[in-house]
Image (cartoon, rainbow, N blue to C red):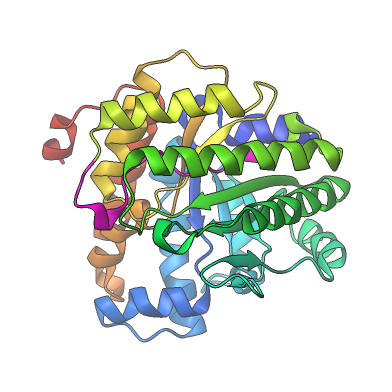
Amino acid sequence: MSERLEDIAAAMVADGKGLLAADESSGTIKKRFDVIGVESTADSRRDYREMMFRASDAMTKYISGVILYDETIHQNAADGTPLVDIIKASGAIPGIKVDAGAKPLAAFPGDTITEGLDGLRERLAEYYKLGARFAKWRAVIDIDVAKGVPSATSIGSNAHALARYAALCQEAGIVPIVEPEVLMDGAHDIDICYEISKATLTKLYTELYAARVVLEGTILKPNMILAGKKSGKVSSPDEVAEKTIKLFRETVPAAIGGIAFLSGGQTDEQATANLNAINAIGPHPWTLTFSYGRALQAAPQKAWSGKAANVAAAQAAFAHRAHMNHLAALGQWQPTLEQAA
């Protein structure tokens, strides 16, 4: 496989394939395991992820890359094979989450700044040796209009951190996924989401240019434009598609390597339907696909429930969700295909 950044980025979004975000922190995956009654241990986390990485049907046909957590990139499968090698054998590219999480932004209540730049150059060199060819850094932008959240300082600080991270990745031969997530948790309407996302993306690309990041060797992982969960409104796929593409045409350079959406708290089917609607109104200047965590994993997690006897059923559930999102990335998904499963 080519080691040029732009070739790796192109492969990450090619042929309707998308990314499996399997980079949940130990705290997050414990919450998921609590729901299915599984104790979260290094072995149970490995068994669960190995189950997905060995779902060869799903991985080979629909998954271009896997975002890993630090623990996982170092782990071996039950038979001793490095998990990274299982991913590579399926034709997918191993990637790594490198940020240290969102922390409160001093003097700005309600705002956060993502940390993790200290020592990042050295960590990236180690991850490269372990086989990672792309990385992910997530900035978190919450919306609370009454409290003046987010502040311009928060948007600016997070955009600057994303740019510094991206430059370090490219220096290390690793494609940066830049993820400025405007959360859908609030009570805001779809237009507020649009305005905040516009301010965020405008600032992000100003900072990436200033940091001399090569845009062709980057992937954008954005939120879709949606009404907040607490608004009581559910945005239709057509409205989501129209507003999301309008925003990108105003703010996202055509030069970037591609766009892989986060699911951000949407239900499995919502995330698929919205991605499909976005691609159905194309063609667009960029390839648009998925980088889903929960929206790919909720069904297989439930089917697996920590039991070896359920592995085949869980792999089938994973393959179905991956297939649906693959079709959505091509603009060819239909709701009737969900019932067929």
Of residues 169 and 207, the one nearer the viewer is 207
**Compared with residue 179, is residue 252 higher up or lower down, i.e. above or below?**
above
Q: Is residue 143 visible?
A: yes
- Location of residue 190 (image quadrant): top left
Residue with the most extreme top position: 283
In the displayed structure, does residue 128 sit left or right of residue 33? Answer: right
Q: Which corner quadrant holds the C terminus?
A: top left
Residue found at x 26% / y 82%: 37
Of residues 321 and 31, the one nearer the viewer is 31
- Location of residue 227 (image quadrant): top left
Segment colored magenta: 218-234
- Location of residue 112 (image quadrant): bottom right
Residue found at x 32% / y 55%: 315
Q: Position of residue 69 (x, y in %)?
A: 59, 67
In the displayed structure, does residue 153 sit left or right of residue 170? Answer: left
Q: Position of residue 24 (x, y in %)?
A: 49, 67
Q: Which corner quadrant holds the N terminus?
A: top right
**Compared with residue 230, is residue 17 higher up or lower down, i.e. above or below?**
above
Total numbered labels placed on residues in the image = 0
Q: Position of residue 142 (x, y in %)?
A: 47, 59
Q: Position of residue 97 (x, y in %)?
A: 63, 61
Q: Is residue 1 visible?
A: no
Of residues 122 and 101, the one nearer the viewer is 101
Q: Report the magenta stretch's main SS.
A: loop
Residue found at x 21% / y 43%: 234
**Is 89 in the magenta?**
no
Residue found at x 36% / y 42%: 322
**Compared with residue 318, is residue 311 higher up or lower down, i.e. above or below?**
below
Of residues 309 and 226, the one nearer the viewer is 226
